[in-house]
Image (cartoon, rainbow, N blue to C red):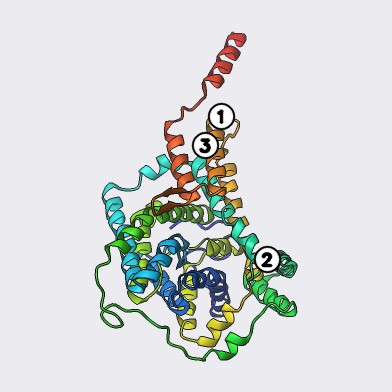
Amino acid sequence: MAEKKHDVVLDVNERPKPGQWVGLSIQHMFSMFGSTVLVPILVGLNPGIALFSSGVGTLMYILITKGKIPAYMGSSFSFIVPMVALMKTVGYPGIAQGTIAVGCVYLIVSLIVSKIGSDWIDKILPPIVVGPIIMVIGLSLAGTAAKDATINAAGHYDLRYFLVALLTLMITIFFNMYLKGFMGLIPILLGIIFGYGIACLFGLVNFAPIAKAHWISLPAFQIPFVTYHPHIFWGAILSMAPIAFVTMTEHMGHIMVLNELTDRDFFKDPGLNHTLAGDGTASIIAGLVGGPPVTSYGENIGVLAITKVHSVYVLGGAALFAILFSFIGKLSALIQSIPSPVIGGISFLLFGVIASNGLKVLIDNKVDLGKKRNLMVASTILVIGIGNAYLQLGQYQFSGLAVASVIGVILNLILPDKANSEKEVEAKAAKRND
C-alpha cells in the first residue's frame, strides 16, 4: 500500500465517518450532475437514465479497479455529434449499439494491455509530456466554464450571470480557505448551495419543473428485447466505436492527474488493463439501460484536488446517491434547476486546480524548460490542446487534447536530447575552459 501523503485528509482506502460520508458524496454528485445530464439533454435522451447509468457504471469501475482508483464515470461529450445524428435516423437502438461497441473496444484494448504490460507508458509519457497534457485537460475546459458564467439561455451575454458566477467563486474560495473541520471538507457543495441562493436573488432559478415533478419517478429505461427489438446498425457502430480511441487518451490523462494527486501509479496497480476494462464495462452497462457512453470526469478530479479527500468510498457514495436521485423526480428536478452561472463559478476553480496540478508535475520533476527539446514538446502540447486544434477525418473528429497528446508523445520520442545549437554552445564553452 502506498504511503499516505502528509497533506491528505482521507487517503484512497480510508473510510469517512457516516455523517462526513454523506456530505462528501453529495458534493461529488453535485459536481458531476450538470455535465452528466447535459449530454442526454443535448442528444434527446432521458437525463434520469444517464444519472442512473453513471452511478451503476461508477460502482462497476470501482469494483473492476479493485477499489483502488477514486474516479467517477459520467456522460461523455465526445460522442455527442454521432449520437445526435443517430437520434434523428435510427433512434436510441442505434445509439445503444454504438455505446456498447465503444465499451467493447475498451475491453479489447484492455486485454491487449494485459498481455503486453504497461512498462511502455513510462517511456512515452515522461513528465515533460504528462505535465502539459494535465494542464490542457484543465485549461481546455476554461471556455466551457466561461460560457456557463456569462451566456444565458438565449445565447446572449448576461451581466447577472457573470456576477452570480464570480460571487459563487469567491464564496467557494472563502469556504476552502477559512472553514475548519467537516465544513472545511465540503467547500464545493457549500459553494453550490450558496451560489444557488444568490441565483435565486437574481431571479435566475426556474422552480416550475420542480413543482411539476413527481416525488417518485421511474426513469424511461431503454432495454434491448424488453422495450425494443434490436437490429444490427453497422453505421452506428462504425460511427461511434473509433471515437473510443480518442476518449482513451482522455482516460489516460485523467489517470495521470490521479497519479499525481494520490502519489500512486495506477498504470501499474491496479494496471491500465483494469482501468480500461472498468471504463468499457461502464459504457456497456449504459448502452444496455438507455444511457450515453461514459468516461471519467475532470470535475470530480478537481474536487479531489481541492478537498484532499481521495477516499474511493466517497466516490462510491456519490454513485449510490446518483442512482437514488434518478428515481426521485423532485430531487433530480431540483439539481437540474441549478443555473449555469453557479456551475460556471465552481468550474473556474475546479478546472484551474487540474491545470495547476499539471504545472506541479513539471516543478516537482525539475523539468528544465530552458532546454529547447522540452520547450518544443511543452509548447506544442499546450497550444494545440488548449486551442482545440481538432482533426476532422470524414465524420470522425479527434479533439485538440487527443491531437496534442499524440503529437507530444511523438515529439518526445523523436527529438534528440539536445539541439545542435546547444551542442555547439557547449563545445565552445568546453574549448574555452581547456
Cα distance between the residues tagged 3 and 1: 9 Å
| Mark closest to the chain's N terminus, 2 or 1 | 2
Residue 291 location in percent, x, y?
40, 73
Instruction: Tell me: 106 left or right of 170.
Output: left
Residue 69 in view: no
Q: Residues within 10 Å of mark 1 (few under 14, many from 20)?
A: some
Of 98 and 363, which appears nearest the observer?
Answer: 98
Residue 312 location in percent, x, y?
47, 67
| Mark closest to the chain's N terminus, 3 or 1 | 1
Quadrant holding the C terminus: top right
Residue 161 location in percent, x, y?
70, 69
Displayed quadrant of residue 431? top right
In the rendered image, the vertical position of residue 31 relative to residue 212, given as above or below: above
- The residue beneath circle 3 is 377
Displayed quadrant of residue 159? bottom right
Quadrant holding the N terminus: bottom left
Mark 1 residue type: Lys
Label annotation for residue 372? 1
**Dot 3: element:** helix
Residue 234 in view: yes
> Disc 2 or disc 3, which is closer to the eye?
2
